[in-house]
Image (cartoon, rainbow, N blue to C red):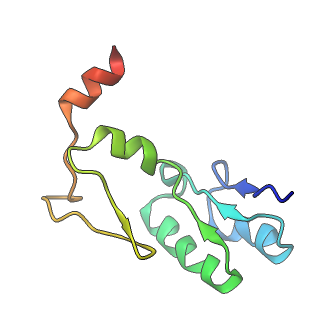
Amino acid sequence: MGIPIAVGESIRTRHEYLPWLEQRAADILQPDIGRSGISEAMALASIPNLYMLEYQPPTLGLANKLLDTPIELHDGCYRIPDGNGLGVRISERRIRDLQA
């Protein structure tokens, strides 16, 4: 039975992922955008294609619980919301529901 190994929440740069990738020691990369930043996370997202690994942003599930309109995955790509700024709007109602 194969159990996928995910790494990354404590890794800050794409260079720190390379040993994991080169040794094929991880199946899923889960960067923490709060640690790595947006630019580094985007650079990292292009690397798994070279190694044929899954790239999984770890906070999307929680984010979708807080947004008025969830971010959707369609044919392997995330659909970019078209709202102002980052394109998303936080739902005050959903936040209250999670607090209760």
In this rendering, the answer to whether 94 lies above or below 78 is above
- Image-quadrant location for residue 62: top left
Q: Tell me which residue sits at (81%, 70%) in the image.
A: 19
Q: Is residue 95 left or right of residue 48?
A: left
Residue 34, image x, y percentages: 48, 48
In this rendering, the answer to whether 91 lies above or below 11 is above
Q: Tell me which residue sits at (26%, 44%) in the image.
A: 67
Residue 38, image x, y percentages: 43, 62
Q: How many marks?
A: 0
Q: Is residue 52 left or right of residue 92?
A: right
Q: Tell me which residue sits at (67%, 73%) in the image.
A: 53
Q: Residue pushed farthest bottom?
A: 50
Q: Residue pushed farthest top?
A: 100
In this rendering, the answer to whether 29 lies above or below 97 is below
Q: Is residue 27 left or right of residue 75?
A: right
Q: Quadrant of the N terminus?
A: bottom right
Q: Quadrant of the C terminus?
A: top left
Residue 75, image x, y percentages: 41, 76
Which residue is more in the foreground, 23 or 68? 68
Q: Is residue 45 left or right of residue 89?
A: right
Which residue is more in the foreground, 67 or 38? 67
- Image-quadrant location for residue 83: bottom left
Q: Residue pushed farthest front?
A: 1
Residue 69, image x, y percentages: 22, 50
Q: Tell me which residue sits at (45%, 68%) in the image.
A: 39
